[in-house]
Amino acid sequence: AIQMTQSPSSLSASVGDRVTITCRASQGIGNDLGWYQQKPGKAPKLLIYAAFSLQTGVPSRFSGSGSGTDFTLTISSLQPEDFATYYCLQDYNYPYTFGQGTKLEIK
Amino acid sequence: EVQVVESGGGLVQPGRSVRLSCLFSGFIFNNYGMHWVRQGPGKGLEWVASISWNSGSIDYATSVKGRFTISRDSAKNSLYLQMNSLRVEDTALYYCVKDKAAVPGYGLDVWGQGTTVTVSS
């Protein structure tokens, strides 16, 4: 199975900050990577698919980049509603695998 | 509007069985692959199983292979997860999830509200 290593596991930041979260795959996955946001008590929400495509309705401050094994989620200017846990997911082959998650907290 | 209604969770003893169901509406169910994803208490997300649009391709996580069965009924726009030989470590919130596109690799865009399965004696 492909291992997804996500970092950092937690992050403290302030409103207006630029934040970057990374995921590294144990083998090449092309562009088959998505980013998900999960708030407490809620289902995950798709933010980015196919490494860099913005899901409909997601603010443009979210962006994704990378291909092959190294991927990045960037939030250009944090807003109060962005404090949540973020996960990457490789959907290149089965079994699909998630990163361990990054909890983004208010500094 | 896309809607998902999950049902079937609850408290079950180790070794017993339970069946989860998801009813989808608001899109052409037959066009998309479907998945189950779970989240243990205080833990991260774990992909559990998937089924292609026509049930021709089915895959499972190693942790559930041989115990869980995913299926779908296109006439009822429904997805199912039959969970047998349940273990304490299967305790989790189970989400039914839809592929964004007609082919894999484009993310999972519709998530149910989740149904809780608690395995305990």
Image (cartoon, coloured by chain):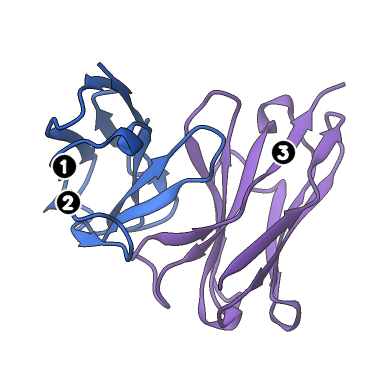
Image quadrant assignment for residue A59: bottom left
Left or right: where A25 falls relative to B4 = left
**Letter of the blue chain:** A
Chain under label 3? B
Chain under label 2? A
Q: Which residue is mark 1?
A: A74
Disc number lying in front (2 or 3): 2
Q: Colour of chain B?
A: purple
Find out whether the residues at labels 1 and 2 contact each other: C-beta distance under 8 Å.
Answer: yes
Give me the residue at 31% from left, 62% from top.
A55
Left or right: where A84 falls relative to B93 = left
Sequence order check: which comes first, mark 1 or mark 2? 2
Q: Which residue is mark 2?
A: A63
Give me the residue at 64% from left, 44% from top.
B94
Q: Amino acid at mark 3?
A: Thr
Vertical placement of residue A2 versus B71, above or below: above
- Disc 1 on helix, strand or loop? strand
Chain under label 1? A
Neighbour class for label 1 at 10 Å: few (<14), some, many (≥20)?
A: some
User: Which of the numbered marks, if any, corresponds to residue B116?
Assistant: 3
Vertical placement of residue A104 versus B107, above or below: above
- Disc 3 on helix, strand or loop? strand
Image quadrant assignment for residue A98: top left
